Image (tube, helix red, strand yellow):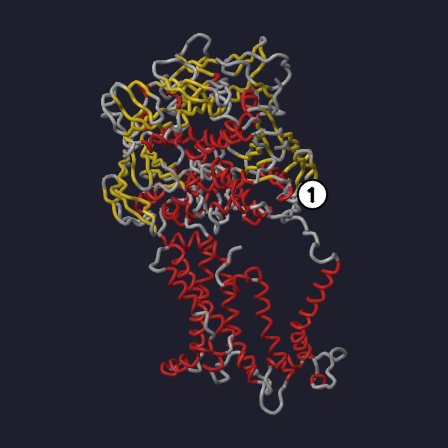
Amino acid sequence: MGTVAVNGLCKSFGKVQALDGVTLDVPDGSFFVVLGPSGAGKTTTLRAIAGLEKLDAGSVHLDGRDATGDTPAARDLAMVFQSYALYPRHTAYENIASPLRARRCSSSEIAAAVDQMSSLLHIERLLQRRPAQLSGGEMQRVALARALVRHPRAFLMDEPLTNLDLKLRVEMRTELTRIHRSLGATFVYVTNDQVEALSMADQVAVLKEGKVQQVGTPTEVYERPANQWVAGFVGSPPISLLACRAEGDRLVGADGWTLPRPRWTTAEDGRALLLGLRAEDLSVERRGDASLPGELYGLEPLGDRTVVDVRVGTEILKVKARPTVTGTPGERLLVTVDLDRAHLFDAGTGLSLSEAGR
Amino acid sequence: MAVSVDEAVSTGPARDNPPPARRFRGRGRSVLEVALLAVLAVVMLFPVLWMIETSIKENRDVYAIPAKFLGFTVTMDHFKDVFVGSAGGRSSLSVAFLNSIVVAGVSTVLATVLGVPAAWAYSRFAVKAKKDQLFFILSTRFMPPVVVVVPIFLMYRQVGLIDTKLGLILIYAAFNLPFTIWMMKGFVDEVPAEYEDAAMLDGYTRLQAFWRFTLPLLVPGIAATAVFALIFSWNEFVFAIFLTSSDGVRTAPPAIAGLIGGTTVDWGLVAAASVVFALPVLVFAYLVRKHLVAGVTLGAVRR
Amino acid sequence: MAGIEVTALHKRYPDGTVAVEHVDLSIGDGELFVMLGPSGCGKTTTLRAVAGLERQTTGDIRIGDTLVNDLPPAERDIAMVFQFYALYPHLRTRDNLAFPLRAEGLPKPEVRERVDEAARLMRLGPLLNRRPRQLSGGEQQRVALARALVRRPRAFLMDEPLTNLDAELRADMRTEIKHLQGELGATMVYVTHDQVEAMSLGHRIAILNKGRVEQIGTPLEVYDRPASLFCAAFIGSPPMNLIEVELVDGKLRSQGGLVLPPPPGLRRDRRLVAGVRPEALEVTEPGADRSVPARVVSAEWLGDEIIYVVDHGGQRDLRVRMPPTVRFAADASVGLRHIGGTPAVYDVSTEDLVA
């Protein structure tokens, strides 16, 4: 069993409120990602689960039992730190063996477990080296091995891929997913990279300034964001937001543009709204019923696609286009909108209005 | 990796090129430098050189007028006299040196054993009014021993610690402790707390984590801090002279000072005793030379 | 504005480390030129040499037609924006902007006019009376940019200016910088390790590795035809698939049977690797027309697309870009099909592009 639950966590550092009532439920065996920008409280949440941080309020439950007062050692958790925290004076072997030595396992048990882990992570030939003699990627694997060697109740990971270069990061993402699947263990994974969250998670909890904004599957968080901030944080390029209000059967923009009002919205007339449009739901190459007039602001060729920046009124829309698209800044364009996939938010509260009727 | 504003607006090429001699015309500048340094060297080193010479001169050369700088016969008699008494046994000076070793050694050990855990606690934990506490600790170093020696004397007389090695050990430890804490905290701050976090998750208690993983990394820092404490205790004069009186308890500084006075002074012996006394400090100071700046700035240990 | 010429640049430190082995660059007047590479590749050292903050061991630097090797930074008529903003903490924004101009001795009305113009370009209006500590990271970076603008230099040098910002802010600032550059027609040399930034900003990109330039080209050139295996792995996310192939019957064949059209003029006697972008492959139902068998290792859903990692002929890490509506489960047997054009082909031993 490996369920982890936190309830109403509150923690402040001086004047900064790092956690403000964080409540999360991590199901057994899931890959649970805590996503948020730096300073959101994700690392503090993880450390609270591990028992490394004293809480001002709130409780931590492991497998249904209140573990808030337990020492880190008693919680039977394993953690991979962002800086790996490999003991610098010990060899890789000794680092990996450390959790087993702490629990007084026999040398033969230790040898067998370290062997198994090092072959799982392909680090057999590194075992006699010290951390200073390892590359970033190798250190990360050793840190993983140290966490995995004990088969704990759950694994906590604090932005483990942040310090790796792009190629390694992409490879390790797949590797971690594979390891998770083969172990079937509970992973609580903290990151500020929404690509990691979407590609690896069973469930995502989005945090901002110590408060949980939304918890859901990657699909839910991407396609049905609870508020405008989540919509902007998840997804690349970031969602484009246009100020507007509903009037009869049209949406009227602050800059004078109009669009047919989506069938699914029940927002009353006159209410200040934000229309959220993802780059892949916009097009400068297709014709459609709903379109916005704009002016080419810039082009971002990314290889497999080009992001076209179009100025509509005072806002800049980001539109996904084929890699071969060209244009001159300033030229007039029509941006076709797929209204069925658009989002509407209350301009004041930021909350999503898109749920009704969809 | 932060770029300082100065670097950003600098008008000359950076670090690895020798700066062109701009302000002083070429050679003129370096001659002035050398001359100033030479004068400084002579002023600072001359007394030391004279002391060393005096310790190896025969008595008639010591008192010779005009003073003999070169061309004297070397004798080791004075050094013998430092250690061997007039009756052939141990001299009282050698007892004093022994006392110095014991007092300085034990007080340093005490200050280190108490200071290191305290520094660790200050570094790792959120203590109420930490900044104020640390400042208070540091402030005890602002005042010279001479200010408190009278109250200490009165207190010691009450509890019977006058003229005891234990009394000196305790006061030295007390005076060294704030410095030990302050300096060690800097070293502990340098060791990432994450090693202890990782160890606790591995299954160790906090104390075990400190002992197994952090302490080994602190050894250089502890060594440097201990040497500074040792140097202070070794050289300490005020408490020694006020709180002790008998030959069996006295440490080296008051003992050597006691040689000066009365009708005639055996300068050769004084010089030899001073050389013997200064030697350990020189050796230790050399060992921690890299950290000497830290000792002077008391806390700004990192480069 | 002026172009910049870097000729045979070499930088070696006294302790023996060679930061820049050999760099030749020809940056056009009004071009947004990006230097891209991993940390330690020499891009920042090259930039600092152009700025005059470091002196090169050998090699020449020309700004416009002037040889600037012996000129200090202040006399090179360039402005630099740093990763860490380097704003004067005790000055208000307005004074931070005016400082370089006052230092040059410009008359007050001109200083005011230039400050106002830069503030307008970078939309700093409400921030002019604040001090750096009252500004957010993004605002500070805009002020740093404005401070470079006021000097009206011949070229702008930017050292990873967006690295410290949050992803969302970075995307916005990228658009701003690109638009600004276009509007001003400014010559900009931009250093970054982020290949998305490089692709979206640069008119041309120079990829550096271990002190040497591996390739210079437009974003699309560098993406479609990376000059070496290093460039192929560095540009593009996910990285290019590198498949060992053999020339058989006039076609390129992988171990698992995948067939690719060969570029013309390929010789048989070398061991070859074909670079195939994830979007040049397709995952289909097993047995589909022209497909070869493969197995799904994992599926990474990214919102607007899915990246499938497939196992094909023993190569377990082929990545395929598919629309988010096409769903296959992990461990599923599928078909793999090449749908792109002629792949870039590399020699395994030299790691260079051969065709």
The image quadrant where one finds the N terminus of chain A is top left
Is any atom of residue C238 visible in this view?
A: no
Name, please, the residue furthest toward the right: B71
Image location of residue B168, percent across then percent down: 45, 76
Residue for point 58% across, 18% down = C345
Which residue is at the front of the view, A122 or B179? B179
Residue for point 56% across, 45% down = C101
Q: Is label 1 in a helix, a strand or a loop?
A: loop
The image quadrant where one finds the C terminus of chain A is top left
Image location of residue A4, percent across then percent down: 28, 38
Q: Please, is residue B50 above or below residue A225 in the view? A: below
Image location of residue C221, percent across then percent down: 57, 21
Name, please, the residue furthest toward the front: C109
How would you rate the neighbour count of disc 1 (Cα within 10 Å): few for under 14, some for 14-19, many for 20 or more?
some
Quarter of the image for residue C72 reads top right
Instruction: Using the image, name the chain to which the residue with label 1 belongs.
Output: C
